[in-house]
Amino acid sequence: MIEPASVPLSAATRVVGVIGDPVAHSLSPRLHNAAFRAMGLDWVSVGFRVDASSTAAAIAGAPALGIQGLSVTMPHKEAVASLVACTPAAQRLASVNCVTFGPNGAEGDTTDGAGLLAALFRQSGFVASGKRVFVVGTGGAARAITAAFGDAGAAEVLVLGRNADRVSRTAAMAGAVGRPARTEEVTGCELVVNATPIGMAGQPTDGITWPVDPGLVTPDQLAVDLIYHPVRTPWLAALVDQGVPVMNGIGMLVHQAALALERWTGEVVPVEAMWAAVADPSDPGPSV
Amino acid sequence: MIEPASVPLSAATRVVGVIGDPVAHSLSPRLHNAAFRAMGLDWVSVGFRVDASSTAAAIAGAPALGIQGLSVTMPHKEAVASLVACTPAAQRLASVNCVTFGPNGAEGDTTDGAGLLAALFRQSGFVASGKRVFVVGTGGAARAITAAFGDAGAAEVLVLGRNADRVSRTAAMAGAVGRPARTEEVTGCELVVNATPIGMAGQPTDGITWPVDPGLVTPDQLAVDLIYHPVRTPWLAALVDQGVPVMNGIGMLVHQAALALERWTGEVVPVEAMWAAVADPSDPGPSV
């Protein structure tokens, strides 16, 4: 990490932030503040630690305080979806990661899926339309990206998970092109995405080593791990050793934040400046 | 003014601020942020523009958002006094300029009067106990300092104003030692304070030139103008020409903010660093 954003502040500075609990390790303020600096905007982003019982008070209080927008992270994504007017994408996921306080009230949106699509295109030139995509996982991130791949015209979105019911519900996010998958079907998919916590720092391994056996993935495929801590998971490292092009989760993180800032400011957001604010100097970067 | 505070920020940074409308010209964030830097605290202060109809939502939302404390300025000081538990001082004034969000809820206090007493002692070694004090004005600031002089053991607090009823109510803030005054009674008071807007930048003069005729004030008295914009009002300038020691309102501004920060952080606050953050380089400084 480079040094935290150094922001000039006055009482005229507009305020945005991220709500979560815990929130102290969120990278959102760092990303937002880097963008504001590069944009020359007198805005600032801070972290608001909001406990699960205070979501409604926080969402009601934020616009009263003149706060322009909030990123939303755990444990509030679902609760916020029931508190604000949602975009169709957020409504389908019943999950909000971004609230914009406008003249017509609070609007909730989800920018994770679109963030991943933007990162895939920027880092790898990958376009989901017409492609077969393999998603591992059934949590909130898996549902968000499965929906986004469906919306983007993927030919098929295959979902792998341990719980058949959760797999079905996740696959349904992609509409008609989503379906549960068996592991070996990863062969023949252009893109493989790990949306599980397997390989995340501090995450118990639970006896599971890989989201998908790296031996099943080949150099003509693209592999993405939504994890960015560590910068390179054991899975990505194994794939790199085999010559498979890989991307970690920093791109999705940066682009979902950029999309939130676009909604709040109405301006074009400098993604490079945000990237620089969170990229680890030891990060080998995308291998594509 | 020196450059606005440059504050390193992350999602772990604790948030305080000032609510008001307008709020853009408030010096509170600048004062607070200068103190946080000098104290080595990872805290930040911002301005929250809260319109008069949203006071309650803002005060309810702030602790939900994990905000530690709020300075309160126009038009919210009276409304907030009815929304939170007040200290006796704030209750008597029915006015709050500082809210602390603690484990037992929100507590409203008033630090303007104590701020002026602290500034008087620091800048001039002035102690109100046993002194005769002459206050010009009947607004919120006049009431706050009249109460503080009474609490500090002033022998007499004389209040001058145009509206007899308002004068009586202001003088009553000092209890038994407060009383309405005639202009010529300024003679014999150790301290004269202008708590009216006469001489404030952008304020219509209304045909009134002076809070008190400068010819009535002598070099053995101390004169204070609560105004700090301009740094030296025509009244203070006339008094300086006569050799009267004077103070402007920067000291009260700085010390009331320092007292707020003490309540929020529980730590000793570096007043000098705050002073440096708002002192105008062209400020000749206290003439005492």
Image (tube, coloured by chain):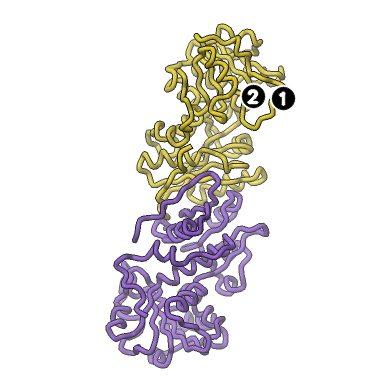
Chain colours: A yellow, B purple
Amino acid at the residue labelled 2? Ile
Residue B58 drawn above or below residue B153: above
Residues at circles 2 and 1 in contact by the CB criterion of under 8 Å: yes
Amino acid at the residue labelled 1? Asp
Compared across the picture, whether A26 is left or right of B247 comes to right
Q: Locate the C terminus of chain A and report the quarter of the image it occupies.
A: top left
> Tag 2, which secondary structure?
loop
- Residue A234 pos. (x, y %): 59, 22
In-front residue for pair B246/B78: B246
Residue A45 drawn above or below residue B76: above
- Residue B240 pos. (x, y %): 30, 81
Which chain is home to disc 1? A
Distance between the alpha carbons at the discs numbered 2 and 1: 9 Å
> Tag 1, which secondary structure?
loop
Mark 2, residue position? A198
Q: Residue at the top extreme?
A: A188
In which quarter of the view is residue A181 placed? top right
Look at 34% across and 88% down and name the residue there: B219
Q: Which mark is residue A206?
A: 1
Q: Residues within 10 Å of mark 1 (few under 14, many from 20)?
A: few
- Residue B236 pos. (x, y %): 32, 78
Q: Residues within 10 Å of mark 2 (few under 14, many from 20)?
A: many
Compared across the picture, whether B86 is left or right of B207 comes to right
Look at 40% across and 35% down and name the residue there: A273
Is there one chain holding both mark 2 and mark 1? yes
Compared across the picture, whether B272 is left or right of A230 comes to left
In primary-sequence order, the first of circles 2 and 1 is 2
Which chain is home to disc 2? A
Residue A59 visible in rendering:
yes
Look at 49% across and 15% down and name the residue there: A245
